Each structure stands twice: as structure tokens, then as C-alpha cells.
Image: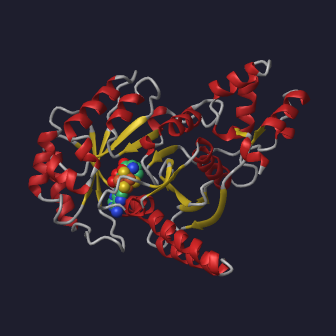
Amino acid sequence: MTSSRKTNLLGISRPALRDLFVEWGEKPFHAEQVMKWIHQRGVLEFAAMTDISKALRTRLEERCTLSLPDFSQHHASDDGSHKWVLEVASGSKVEMVFIPEAGRGTLCVSSQAGCSLDCSFCATGKQGFDSNLSAAEIVAQLWWANRQLAGGDGRSERAVSNVVMMGMGEPLLNFDNVMEAVQIMMDDCAYGLSKRKVTISTSGVVPAIRNMRGRTDASLAVSLHAPNDALRSQIMPINRKYPIAELLDAVRSYMSSLSDKRLPVIEYTLIAGINDHRQHARDLAELLANFPCKINLIPFNPFALSDYKRPSGSAVSNFRQILLQAGYTVTVRTTRADDIGAACGQLVGEVADQTRRSARHQKRAAGAASGVLATDKLRASADRL
Ligand code: SAH
Ligand code: SF4
């Protein structure tokens, strides 16, 4: 495909586009016009960008492309949630999920196909790493959700108000592409999302958190999941490389680089009998005593390849109570938000798993049957929402 050698403008930030135009001897302000056509009006044909010169449109057509991944599968749940599976350049399938809530619409975006970090409670981790998504493939998830959810011409109010990088993969191991994509999401000539409403979730890639300083001012969520290094290393192998003290120090340093007062979110997935004892809650309260943050408790979402169990309602409530008494702001994912976790950490795994099987099937058979299987699996998982 010749287009694959062209620059996909869906994933090019405004400064980079301005540079490109200057390099071409064009006025840099055309970058603003082109960005608005693509991201605000949803136009993917250069020929339709009528407020720029014919000469520039022709040049764009020759050297650039505006291509979307294939969003072949979609499921709309009764509660208003949507899931899409997209096929990325590597041939892998990843997923994004839209969850409407009162006053906001959150899109859970994927940054990698698979993940190399192998956290013991995560289905994506069980897949291993497949590939990084390009900046265009990351931005395309937001472009697509807004277009699909707005209905009609897509000019009505945009549906997605918040983006969380909590889909498949570790965003900070795909650093440059994620930074470029986040910049586009927050650009007023594109989606104009506020820095408080774009959240990067990380398992704790310390050098990359340090590199975020000055590169972005997006919000940060940290997957902690344990109050001490021994336990965290057991469930999150990355902790052996970057232990808790280093992680918290890097997060503190990033937060202090921001121009406004914002707190990081500490995510804590509660797994029955592993990290959900009262003593773990007391230890967590002590660990974070001098670390300003909000805490989000996520009851574990069970999946086929894991023996872990979801904690009882009373275990979750006891854990929360101890943190509240210690003065923390604590949220617990509700049943529905709980399933965002399932969607992000778990359902994607099932789809990807199915995809691999599909790939094998397709070599032998027609491929249609495996497509049906993947869709069925998706529907079954979506029904849990
Ligand atoms: N790699 C990043 C972002 C993707 S995972 C990270 O680890 O932060 C998004 C969130 O889902 C993380 O907090 C992760 O710990 C959580 N998660 C993964 N699998 C889960 C499961 N089975 N149940 C509950 N939460 C899960
Ligand atoms: Fe990767 Fe995050 Fe899953 Fe860990 S929890 S394996 S870092 S996607």
C-alpha cells in the first residue's frame, strides 16, 4: 500500500504539522485549519478542506494520508456503554470502551496490543506484548467514538468528555506515540479536552514518569495494588525494577511540575486473600501518609486464566473505611465502573485471545467462522456491563 509510506495526519500534533508546512514553504497557520477539519469536523478527505489552497490540498494528497484502523466490531450495551474492537497495523485487535455517566462520557483507550509487564491479575498481561499503537491509531479511537456517538454529521456536542489510558497496554512503554496523541486530544484545534480530563494510567515505569515532566501536563493514575514491595513485586514484576519508594518519588516530582494543584490517583485492585486484608489497608494508609493523592479501589474482575477471586462486599467496605478514617478521599468503582476494569483489563484479553485463535483458523479455513466466535465472545462479555 502506497499510503502506508505517507504521513498519517490523524496522529500529527499541531507543532509538528506547523513544522511540516514551514518545511514545504507554506504558512504554518494552515496547520490549525487542517486540524479543525480532521478532528472537529471529522473530514478525512483533503479535497473537502475548502479553505486551504488547491495547491496545498494536492500536496497533502501526494504526501499524507488520513487513514483509520478497521473498526469492525461494535457492541452497544443497554446501559449506554459502547465497545469497539479495532484492528491495528500489526494485524492485532485491541479494544476501546465508552462509558456514559451523569454529566460526562469517558472513553477508555488502548495504547498497545498486549503488554509486556505481566501483572498477575491482568488478562492483557497474560497475552504478552504484540505491538505499539501509532499516535494515529490512538487518536483514531477518540475520533471514531465521537463520530459514532454524535450520530449524523458528528457536529453535535461531542460525546467524549474524558479519556483514560486504561485500555490495553502500558502507555508509558509507548511513550512518544502516547505523548503525541495526548497532545492532540488536549489541543483546542482538535478535541480541546482539559488536562484534568485526560488521564494516563501507569503501572510505574519510573524513567518514563520522569520524562513526562515538561512533555505533558495530563493527569496521572498509578496502579499501586500493594502497600509494600514484597507483595507488589509478587503481583507486579515491574516493582522488582522500580520499587515503591522510587515510584512515589517520580510521581511526586511529576505532580510538582504541573502549574495547577492536582492530585494523582492511586489505583488499588482488591484481590481476595491477596491484598485486601485490613492490615493491607492500614499499611497503605501509612505508606501514603505524606503523599497527597486520591485512592480508587477496584474490586478484581475475574477472568478464565486467573485463579484470583473478587473480594466480598464487606472486605471492600472495610478496606475503604480504614482509608476514609485515615483521612483519604476514596472512590470504589461501582458495579458498572467495575466493568470498565473488566473491559479494559479483561475483555480485551478475551478478544485478543480470540483474535489469535482466529488468525490460526483463518490460515486453515475461510475465516468467517472465527469472526463469529469473536463477536459472540464480545457480546457475552459486554452483557456483563
Ligand atoms: N498498563 C496501565 C494501564 C492499563 S490497565 C496500568 O497498569 O495502569 C488499567 C487498570 O486496570 C490498571 O489499574 C490495572 O491494574 C487494572 N486491571 C487490570 N486487570 C484487572 C482486573 N482483572 N481486575 C481489576 N482491575 C484490573
Ligand atoms: Fe500491562 Fe497494565 Fe495489565 Fe500490568 S495491568 S499487564 S501494566 S496492562
Q: Is residue 215 above or below residue 242?
A: above
Q: Quadrant of residue 83?
A: bottom right
Say which residue appears at 74% left-offset and 40% top-offset: 6
Quarter in which the C terminus is drawn:
bottom left
Residue 158: percent from left, percent from top:
62, 45
Say which residue appears at 19% left-offset and 36% top-offset: 245
Q: Is residue 303 above or below residue 48?
A: below
Colour mapping used in the image:
secondary structure
Task: Name the residue nearer the viewer: 318 or 230.
Answer: 230
Residue 191: percent from left, percent from top:
61, 37
Task: Name the residue nearer the viewer: 302 or 9.
Answer: 9
All told, the count of numbered labels is 0
Residue 93: percent from left, percent from top:
56, 61
Q: In the displayed orientation, state which residue is furthest to the right.
A: 54
Say which residue appears at 34% left-offset and 65% top-offset: 301
Residue 233: percent from left, percent from top:
21, 51
Answer with left or right where residue 207 lies relative to residue 55: left
Q: Is residue 256 above or below residue 194?
A: above
